[in-house]
Image (cartoon, rainbow, N blue to C red):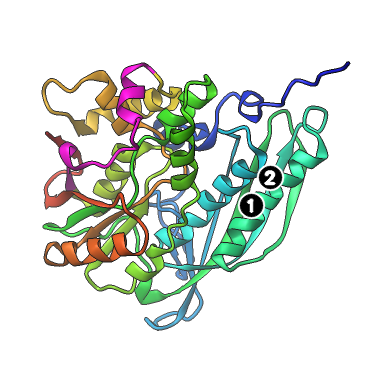
Amino acid sequence: MNIQTPIRLSHLSHGGGCGCKLAPSVLTQLLSSHPMTTPYKQLLVGVETGDDAAVWELDPGNDNGTCIIATTDFFMPMVDDARDFGRIAATNAISDVYAMGGTPIFALAILGMPVDKIPPEMVRQILEGGQSVCAEAGIPIAGGHSIDSPEPIYGLAVIGTAQKADIRRNADAKAGDALILTKALGVGIYSAAFKKSALSRAAYDEFIATTTLLNKVGATLAKEPAVHAMTDVTGFGLLGHALELARGSGKTVTINAGSLPFLKEAAALAQQGFITGASGRNWKSYDAHVTLPDGTAEWQRQILCDPQTSGGLLISCAPDKADTLLKGIVAAGYSSARIIGRVAAGEPIVAVAP
């Protein structure tokens, strides 16, 4: 009898999820010759602050006018279940629109598959997983592009809209602001454990639940004047995306380590050495601009640099409204949301407090 070996999608790629992203330092080098200013006056957000999506103004000078938000995101699998892979990738891609304060309107699929290694039914399940998340977001997949590639790749290009007054960049944090994080950290650690067959079933379920939770609350928060800046925490880890916010805003960001939410088994797995290569690359890219408390253990630093796939929103808001906003975020289904730090006048660095 011929017994087929199950196909492990996570073993068909050299990396997975947002851990595939180029390190921040490499990306900076690649974009070093790219102009930071543009002659296109309607391009409100481009590459200048490493924001989550591009924004194009359709009605110049009208704060109630419509803006187009455009983004693309794709990666290799971090799980073996084809449908789960599609769901995670789609959720992650759509998040960029929510992080800008927008509402997605349609998506295009990006697909690269090693057709000699993966059967058509498995590819179909990946696409169906992505379609199910888009349906939850209320948008169609209106087309796309596919290629035969050495490693499996899936993601979306997503188009959204927002009123100009509702656009939230990562560069508008104000001194005195409180910082809110909407999802628990540790996704990269879970993915490393999964790839080595060391992730429990309960942890896997937690892993899927957080990575397929759409950041819809971003579109609601953008209508709150007390919300000044937003970004989502993905491949550069919490420290990397907090540093982008600090640099873009020209402020010092302080993170209270004791307030951070973690996936239930993240700390234990990190102490056992289940970390991604991306966390080390992340740290080397920004360590000169981050201060850690004396005595910070290696595993604790790894969690702070851990690449998050489909991570939560990092929100900078007026301090007197932070508790009210947090209650609304939790009520909207983000039970791990916490106030994790603050913004202050000062040099653009990230300081981690105990």
Q: Which residue is mark 1?
A: 130
Height in image: 317 above or below 289? below
Q: Position of residue 72 (x, y in %)?
A: 57, 52
Height in image: 224 above or below 71? below
Is residue 30 rendered magenta in the image? no
Left or right of 300 in this view: 77: right
Label placed on residue 179: none
Height in image: 235 above or below 43? above
Q: Which residues are magenta?
A: 252-273
Left or right of 271 in this view: 38: right
Q: Nearer the viewer, residue 297 or 265?
A: 265
Residue 195 picture quarter = top right
Label placed on residue 126: 2
Q: Residues within 10 Å of mark 2 (few under 14, many from 20)?
A: many
Height in image: 340 above or below 278? below
Left or right of 348 in this view: 23: right
Q: Amino acid at mark 1?
A: Gly
Local SS, label 2: helix
**Is the residue under label 2 in contact with that under label 1 (CB below 8 Å)?**
yes
Q: Amino acid at mark 2?
A: Ile
Q: Position of residue 97 (x, y in %)?
A: 47, 61
